[in-house]
Image: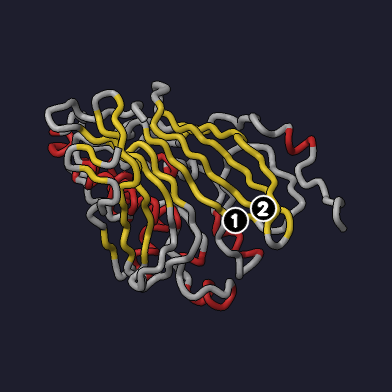
Amino acid sequence: MTAFGDLRVGAELPPLVRGPLTPLHLMRFSAAIENWHRIHYDERFAVEHDGLPGLLVSGSWKQHLVAQMLRAWAGPDGWMSRLELQFRRMNVAGDTLTAWGRIAELDEAGGVAVVRCDVGIRDAHGTESSPGRATCLLALPGGPPARPGVA
Amino acid sequence: MAGVSAEVITPELRALVGVEGPVRTAPSPLGRDALRRFVQAAMEIDPIHWDDAAARAQGHDGVVAPPLYPLHAFPRPDGSPDPLAALDEDPEWDGIELVEDGLPPLDVPLPRLLNGGVAAEVFALARIGDVISARSRYAELTERAGRSGPMVLVVVETDYRDQTGRMLLRTRTTMIAR
């Protein structure tokens, strides 16, 4: 189906914007997860040793950003059940990242809406780095809250 | 050299599909301080990750971890060696430590290994005090013709559970060797 309650195929989800991401943000994330890969916090190493354009934003952090955007949209009665990203391009310190989503497919299962979305991460120039897909379960008006396991 | 193609996926490699590693268990239960540090570093926006009242209002017992947190729930245990000792041998050490998934190594005769992406399926959110465990398996092995020669796509599937066996998260990580 192409429309379901207030949901429409093609509708954009409210984006989540983060940035500019500084070396301080990147260093803090690496420290929190104890990932010592130097390309995330040692600029001389990243540029001179590995030939990169700058400090790299970790792919796992980009996946967390998209998850945050989806969960904020799905709300407390919704459930983000699936999220798949491909890390196609780099994002570096100084970038401002936008986690975005667009409704691609609508379905109904177990009394809740099953919403499949195209998602990704764009930098300030609009360049896509991490295209992917996600599934969110959303409560229907007057219906039960979405719980994991439906789709 | 039409018709001549090196067999990249040997029967030995093929036999790895379905092979499981050991269960890995987090060295300590999920603590409030570890969760706070992660939640602030990832710049989480949902207060159920730091505010007990907000979490209770949504039916949780108290603060809960973000859905993909189990990926990071396996810090070094007490008494493990200092990873930065590698700098004594090589001052230009890149800081990469191999993910200890316990799976037998993949003997693919291709030089480059890239992370092709991660697909996550979320079942539940970890709670304070949960002891998270993980178990990985080789799920798929496929060969493709890439522009610069053969490519092997390896899918490693990992299940994350809490101490009661409740499923938290399943990830499918695609590694590309070429």
**Residue drawn at point x = 32 percent, y = 68 percent:** A96
Residue B102 location, x and y as percent?
61, 37
Q: What is the chain letter for disc 2? A: B
Q: Nearer the viewer, residue A70 or B62?
A: A70
Residue A50 location, x and y as percent?
58, 71
Q: Is residue A139 visible?
A: yes
Label 1 is placed on what type of residue? Answer: Leu
Is disc 1 in the same subunit as disc 2?
yes
The reply to whether discs 1 and 2 touch (Cβ–Cβ < 8 Å) is yes
Q: Is residue A68 visible?
A: no
Q: Nearer the viewer, residue B150 or B2?
A: B2
Does B124 appear above or below A15?
Answer: above
Pick the quarter of the image with the N terminus of chain A: top left
Q: Is residue B39 left or right of residue B116?
A: left
Colouring of the image: secondary structure
Q: Which residue is mark 1?
A: B114
**Residue drawn at point x = 58 percent, y = 59 percent:** B85
Q: What is the chain letter for disc 1? A: B
How busy is the neighbourhood of tag 1: few (under 14 within 10 Å), some, or many (20 plus)? Answer: few
Does B137 appear above or below A58?
Answer: above
Q: Nearer the viewer, residue B145 or B117?
A: B145
Residue B139 location, x and y as percent?
60, 34
Residue A123 location, x and y as percent?
36, 68
Q: Which residue is mark 2?
A: B177
Q: Is residue A145 left or right of residue B134?
A: left
Say which element carries label 1: strand
**Residue drawn at point x = 44 percent, y = 62 percent:** A129
Q: Quadrant of residue A135?
A: top left
How busy is the neighbourhood of tag 2: few (under 14 within 10 Å), some, or many (20 plus)? Answer: many
Say which element carries label 2: strand
Pick the quarter of the image with the C terminus of chain A: top left
Label 2 is placed on what type of residue? Answer: Ala
